[in-house]
Image: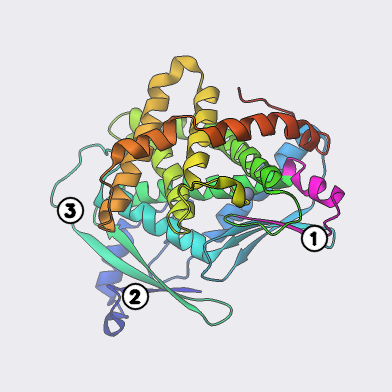
C-alpha cells in the first residue's frame, strides 16, 4: 500500500480538499501514470502485469511454445526483479523498490532537468516534492521522494520515461524466460532457477551466466525498439507534447540509462578491472551492448536517430549525477564506456556466438543474430 506525504512532513500529511483538487488536475492520467489520484492507492502494477503476460502469450503463440507464467509484485524495498523457475512454476517478480526508484529518477529527469525537450516549454514552473510512504509486507518502510510539476506535460513525460524503463527491466526477465536459459540451467542439474537483476546464485560458470544476461538484454533491446517504432512514434499524445520527433529517441535513451544507472551506480558496479569475477557484465558493458543492438535494429540509415538515443543516455547520466552532486567530471570517459568496444565486450560476443546455439536448442524462439 502506498500513501502520499506532502513534502515529507508528517504534519502536512493531510491535504485539504482544494489542494487535492489542484494536484489532481496536474496528474497526467496516462494508462501508466504512477498516480491516478493523490489520495488513492497506486495501482500501477496491473498495467505492467498485463504488459508482461501479453508479451509472453503473443510470443509463445507466434513460435508454438507454451509457458504458464505468473507475474508477481513483491512488496519490499529491494531494487531488483527476477525470473524464477521453482517447482515446475515460472514467474516474473518485480520488487516495489524498483518501481519506486524508477519513478523517482524519471521525475527528476523530466521535471528538474528536462532531458527531453517539451513543446512551448514555459519558464517559472513550480515543482513539488512528494514523499511516497509505502509499507512493505514485512513492515519495512520505504519513503521515496518524487517530483510533481505544475506542468501537466512534465508529469506526462515522467510517466513515459518510467514506463519505458520498467518495460526494459521486465522484458529482460521475459528474455530469460523465453530464450532457453531456464532449460539450460535445468539441464545442467539445477532444480530451481532464479535470475536476479544484479547477482545470480547458480552452479553455472560466470561466463555462461554473463552471456545469458547479454542475451536477455538483447531481447529487451528488441522489445524497446519495437515499442518505439510501433507505439511511441505513432503516439499522438506523446508527439503532441515533445518539441520534435528527435525527442522521442532521447526519451528512449533517458529511460535506458535510468535502468543502468540503477543497476550500475546503486550496486557500485559500473565498471571493473576484473569482470570475470561476476555473474553479470558491468553496467557500462551492458549499456554499450544494449545501444549496439538498438543501432542494428534501427538500421544503418537511421544513425541520426540512434545518435539521439545516445544523447538521451548521456543527458540522463549528467542529470542524475548533478542531482546527487556527485562527480561527473569526465564525460568523455563515460562516452567511451558506452560507445567503445573493449576487450570484455569482444570476449562476451565471441562466447555468445558459441553458447547461443545451445540456448536456441531449448527454445522455439527464433535465433536472431543481431550483427
Ligand atoms: Zn538478467
Left or right position of 358 against 14: right
Q: Which residues are magenta?
A: 178-196
Vertical arrangement, residue 310 with respect to residue 4, above or below: above
Query: Mark on residue 192?
Result: 1
Q: Is mark 3 within 8 Å of ligand 1?
A: no
Q: Name the residue carrying label 2.
A: 5
Do the CB atoms of the residues marked 3 and 2 lie less than 8 Å apart? no
Q: Name the residue carrying label 3.
A: 125
Q: Earlier in the sequence, mark 1 or mark 3?
A: 3
What is the residue that sits farthest to the bottom in this orientation? 11
Circle nearer the viewer, 1 or 2: 1
Q: Earlier in the sequence, mark 1 or mark 2?
A: 2
Do the CB atoms of the residues marked 1 and 2 lie less than 8 Å apart? no
What is the residue that sits farthest to the left in this orientation? 124
Relative depth, front residue between 86 and 38: 86
Q: Is residue 116 visible?
A: no
Amino acid at each position: 500500500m502506498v500513501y502520499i506525504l506532502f513534502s515529507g512532513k508528517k504534519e502536512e500529511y493531510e491535504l485539504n480538499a482544494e489542494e487535492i483538487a489542484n494536484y489532481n488536475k496536474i496528474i497526467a492520467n496516462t494508462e501508466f501514470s504512477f498516480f491516478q489520484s493523490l489520495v488513492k492507492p497506486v495501482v500501477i502494477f496491473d498495467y505492467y502485469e498485463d504488459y508482461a503476460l501479453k508479451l509472453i502469450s503473443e510470443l509463445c503463440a507466434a513460435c508454438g511454445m507454451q509457458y504458464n507464467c505468473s507475474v508477481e509484485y513483491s512488496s519490499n524495498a529491494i531494487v531488483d526483479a527476477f525470473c524464477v523457475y521453482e517447482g515446475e512454476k515460472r514467474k516474473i517478480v518485480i520488487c516495489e523498490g524498483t518501481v519506486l526508484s524508477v519513478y523517482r529518477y524519471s521525475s527528476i529527469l523530466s521535471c528538474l532537468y528536462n532531458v527531453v525537450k517539451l513543446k512551448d516549454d514555459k519558464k517559472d514552473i513550480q515543482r513539488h516534492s512528494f514523499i511516497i510512504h509505502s509499507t512493505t509486507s514485512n513492515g519495512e518502510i520505504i519513503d521515496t521522494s518524487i517530483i510533481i510539476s505544475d506542468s501537466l506535460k512534465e508529469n506526462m513525460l515522467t510517466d513515459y520515461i518510467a514506463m519505458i524503463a520498467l518495460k526494459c527491466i521486465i522484458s529482460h526477465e521475459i528474455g530469460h524466460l523465453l530464450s532457453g536459459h531456464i532449460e539450460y540451467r535445468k539441464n545442467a542439474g539445477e532444480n530451481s532457477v532464479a535470475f536476479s537483476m544484479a547477482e545470480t546464485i547458480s552452479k553455472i560458470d560466470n561466463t555462461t551466466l554473463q552471456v545469458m544476461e547479454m542475451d536477455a538484454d538483447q531481447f529487451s533491446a528488441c522489445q524497446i525498439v519495437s515499442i518505439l517504432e510501433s507505439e511511441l512514434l505513432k503516439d499522438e499524445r506523446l508527439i503532441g507534447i515533445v518539441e520534435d520527433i528527435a525527442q522521442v529517441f532521447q526519451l528512449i535513451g533517458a529511460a535506458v540509462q535510468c535502468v543502468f544507472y540503477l543497476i550500475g551506480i546503486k550496486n557500485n558496479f559500473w565498471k571493473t578491472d576484473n569482470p570475470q569475477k561476476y555473474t553479470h557484465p558491468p553496467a557500462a558493458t551492458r549499456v554499450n551492448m544494449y545501444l549496439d543492438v538498438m543501432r542494428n535494429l534501427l538500421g544503418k540509415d537511421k544513425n541520426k536517430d540512434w545518435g539521439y538515443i545516445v544523447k538521451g543516455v548521456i543527458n540522463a547520466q549528467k542529470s542524475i549525477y548533478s542531482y546527487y552532486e556527485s562527480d561527473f567530471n569526465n564525460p568523455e570517459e563515460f562516452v567511451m564506456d558506452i560507445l567503445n568496444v573493449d576487450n570484455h565486450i569482444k570476449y562476451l560476443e565471441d562466447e555468445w556466438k558459441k553458447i547461443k546455439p545451445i540456448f536456441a536448442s531449448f527454445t522455439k524462439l527464433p535465433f536472431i543474430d543481431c550483427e
